Image (cartoon, coloured by chain):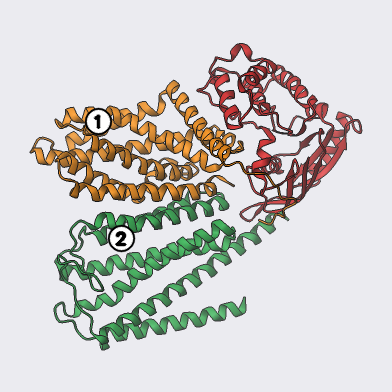
Chain colours: A green, B red, C orange
Amino acid sequence: MEKTTRNLQILNIVTIALMIIATALVFFYAPTERVMGQVQRIFYFHVPSAWVSMLAFFVTLVAGIVYLRRGHRGWDMVGSASVEIGLVFTIMTIISGSIWARPAWNTWWTWDPRLTTYTILALIYVAYLMLRQGLEDPDRRARFAAVYGIVGFISVPITFFSIRWWRTIHPVVIGSGSPSAEGGFDMTSPMRLVFFFSLFAFTVLYFCFLANRLRLERLTERVEQLKMKVLSA
Amino acid sequence: MIETRALAKNFGLKPVLRGVDLDVASGEFVVLFGPNGAGKTTLLRILATLSKPSFGRASVAGFPLPAGAGEVRRRLGVVSHHTLLYGDLTAEENLRFYARMYDVKNAARRIAEMLERVGLAARRRDLVRTFSRGMQQRLAIGRAVLHDPEVMLFDEPYTGLDQDASAMLDGVLREVAAQGRTVLMTTHDLARGLAVADRALVLSRGKIVFSAKRGELDVAEFVHAYDSVVNSYQ
Amino acid sequence: MRTESIRPVQTKTDYWSLFTDYWRAVGAVLGKDFTAELRSKELFSSMLVFSLLVVLIFNFALEFERSRATRENVAAGVLWVTTTFAGTLGLNRSLAMEKDRGSLDGLLLAPVDRSALYFGKALGNLLFMLLVQAVILPVFSILFNLSLLKPLLLVIVLLGTTGYAAVGTLLASMAVHSRARDVMLPILLFPVAVPVLVAAVRASSAILVSAGWEDIGLWFNLLVGYDVIFVAVAYMVFDYVVEE
């Protein structure tokens, strides 16, 4: 127990350091974007946040599949913790996106495909947590959550493509851009550096959250075990 | 026929079965007694392939569980306190459904035979929801033996039955057991259970704590033994 | 779960009889649900009445009269919203009935593949939804003063309902164990069923305005794809839902 906690402490410190560096890079190193100005800096928080939320839900998918095949409860803990953290990043994404949208598009929200799909994604994982909430039996809870995690994740790309053929005004930064997209911009080298560093920092942040959350879950279980031992003595 | 070794089952962190060693020989009628929460239903559900053990081994009719569950189901008949019958279907339709699910040969003849055996031939076109509890239980037994299983599991079959219905059920049970099937039954009814049992077991807090063969104890002695053994663990 | 095998069982696999056994079980479950429903008419009547009420409410909430163009779009939307909500009712009750009476155990005790139970249930649910739609579509035609009985539209209705019933049956099997049972199914189902809704509404809308295949084909393919993917997923995953 002692050793694990020390590793965790190191991870925590490293994470904080990375986030501080990333923030510094965003505000002092990254060049100001030509069209949108200072507000474009949100991009360095918004996009990594979105990608990490997708990573979190992907982890839930994998954890769910492994749990169903192996039955080891640890995988269920990972899946569940990942959804909680994923939702946190989802909220951060939506808020940061909204803050960016107001000056850039003159609106807080729009129902374009990417945003709509993302909202549906959030709803799926809120449903995941509600499903867990409503089930007493721990084994059933884990199985059902795993199944829903799988079904939910698979539905997302399909949902995205189904809505995509409607108009989009969401900036298409990297890769394919449809001509109707406004607000796209090309990244210069320094921007690319800051972006990828920020992405890295956010990913480490995710794992840090995950590790801490799992530790909390393990301790909770330990308390339950001790409680039962005392009660049955 | 039924065998378990160190069978254990946990629900989350809570242990319900704590290492059960059970042996039921072919043709034996074993009755399992025990207070509420002892794990009787859990044990039966595992043997019925409805639940998987957490640790230990179990086998029914020579097939291991849960690996050989499919084969076990073919040879198993289960009667629980839920009747597993469909109220909106007639007695005949219920039996026909289960005959199809179990791929019973000569279904029509077998169904007619079963209805006679359990004394419900006259009511076969009636909807099951119009049946009394006793009639439903009898039909449930008919359903359970439709596919001529080698092993039968009864989970508290006397629940909700009055004296007459219980006596009638006894009759059907004896006939069923007389066929040479292996039976494991759980019940709260000490007197009735002892009357039909070849062997009596007591399950308490997830372990078998007492065993007696027919003729070793009379009812009074058994009740005394049961009380002392169950209460010593509270 | 640590159980050791005692003896492996060798049997010669007869694939044809496995195949017929499987579909016999599916047929048995389907037949049983159908017979029971014919007697009680519980599901059908509640779904039908609910659908009509939903249409009525939409009648007050939206303006149908304005122009013919608006009516097609609105008709498609109302049709699928009605299907979605009424479908939830049917799905919930179909599985709640099994669980409450404990008859789910009866199904699980039978020596049949778990997925056969899934298909039996899902086909039953699909059938009931289609029966309700068979009554609703003519009603719609009258209320909206549009012909909803075009063959291509019926195909879209079939595809959309299939996808919805496929995922709905799987999720309802889980929702029925939850404490907040009645509200759990919509919460689980709606976000995941969005592609069906979008594709079905767009396709229905396009058909009603007599658009060409270029407008409809995309949605048609999406529906087929969704159906195939989720029936496959449900088939693979259903075991884990019902086995303890």
Query: For the residue carrying disc 2, how many other residues have a C-alpha within 10 Å: few (<14), some (14-19), or many (20+)?
Result: some
Q: Quadrant of the C terminus of chain A?
A: bottom right
Nearer to the camera, B207 or B29: B29
Residue A2 visible, this orientation: yes
Picture quadrant where residue C75 is located: top left
Residue occupying the point 27% across, 46% down:
C220
Q: Amino acid at mark 2?
A: Tyr
Q: Residue furthest top?
A: B122
Q: Position of residue C94 (x, y in %)?
A: 45, 34
Q: Nearer the viewer, residue C56 or B25?
A: B25
Residue A45 point in image, percent of width and height: 30, 75
State the residue position of label 2. A118
Q: Nearer the viewer, residue C220 or C104?
A: C220
The answer for which chain carries disc 2 is A
Q: Nearer the viewer, residue B181 or B46?
A: B181
Decide: is A20 above or below A215.
Answer: below
Residue named by callout 1: C137
Mark 1: secondary structure: helix
Q: Label 2: state its secondary structure.
A: helix
Q: Amino acid at mark 1?
A: Leu
Q: Which residue is the extreme one toward the right?
A: B216
Left or right of C28, for residue B206: right
Q: Residue at 50% across / 28% down in the picture?
A: C32
**Residue drawn at x 80%, y 28% as measured from the top left:** B180
* Residue C35 sits above or below residue C13 on the image: above
Neighbourhood count class around disc 1 (C-alpha, 10 Å): few under 14, some 14–19, many 20 upward: some
Question: How many numbered discs sit on the rendered protein?
Answer: 2
